[in-house]
Image (spheres, rainbow, N blue to C red):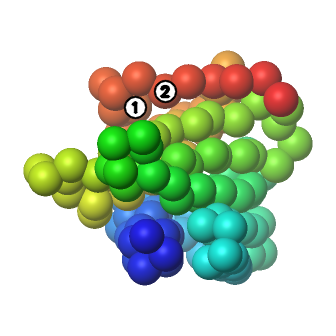
Amino acid sequence: MSTRLLSFLNDVEQALIADPAAQGHNDWDIARMVNYDNHLARMTLTPKRGEASAGQAGSIFLQAYELANDTACLKASLHWNGQNQYTMLTVHAKVSSDWREEAGRIAKVWFAGPPGISVERSTPLPALAQMAVAS
């Protein structure tokens, strides 16, 4: 499970850089941290030289765990600086899982911005449901 955690974090980073919404906004300082013992990972995104809007600075937390049926699962929690709300997405391991596609879905939600905040974006928010939770 720990290997999936680190490789998925890398997939998310690559999806963020490759997303069409990143044009002109992909010059970030990106820091990653992984705690294998607790199955947790964090990626912090900080704009360099202010190219990206302040709403795009923040972090993505990943938690790896197993469901009761021994199926691997990842929970992604997206946090934007200065916001009291965050978005949580779940990725379930299935035979047909496309991990890079799931990483791309997280990147699209990231560029859509914090829940309840209108952020200009060039790509539509995925049809998959997102859950906004007040912190």
Q: Position of residue 38 (x, y in %)?
A: 68, 67
Which residue position holds label 1? 125
Looking at the image, tell me whether mark 2 or mark 1 is earlier in sequence order.
Answer: 1
Q: Position of residue 57 (x, y in %)?
A: 73, 57
Residue 115 appears in view: yes
| Other residues around mark 2 within 10 Å, as few (<14) / some (14–19) / many (≥20) | some
Q: Nearer the viewer, residue 47 or 40?
A: 40
Q: Across the whole image, how many numbered discs are drawn on residues?
A: 2
Which residue is at 58% across, 37% downward?
Answer: 88
Q: Position of residue 3 (x, y in %)?
A: 43, 79
Which residue is at 31% across, 25% downward?
Answer: 127
Residue 48 sits in quarter: bottom right
Q: Nearer the viewer, residue 25 or 70?
A: 70
Q: Nearer the viewer, mark 2 or mark 1?
A: 2
The local secondary structure at tag 1 comes to loop
| Other residues around mark 1 within 10 Å, as few (<14) / some (14–19) / many (≥20) | some
Position above or below: 78 against 118:
below
2 and 1 marks in contact (CB < 8 Å): yes
Residue type of the residue flagged with mark 2: Gln
The local secondary structure at tag 2 comes to loop
Which residue is at 83% across, 29% downward?
Answer: 135
Position above or below: 34 against 42:
below
**For this view, does 98 lie left or right of residue 4?**
left
Q: Position of residue 24 (x, y in %)?
A: 52, 65
Q: Quadrant of the N terminus?
A: bottom left
Residue 52 appears in view: no
Q: Say the numbered circle drawn on residue 110.
A: none
Which residue position holds label 2? 130
Residue type of the residue flagged with mark 1: Leu
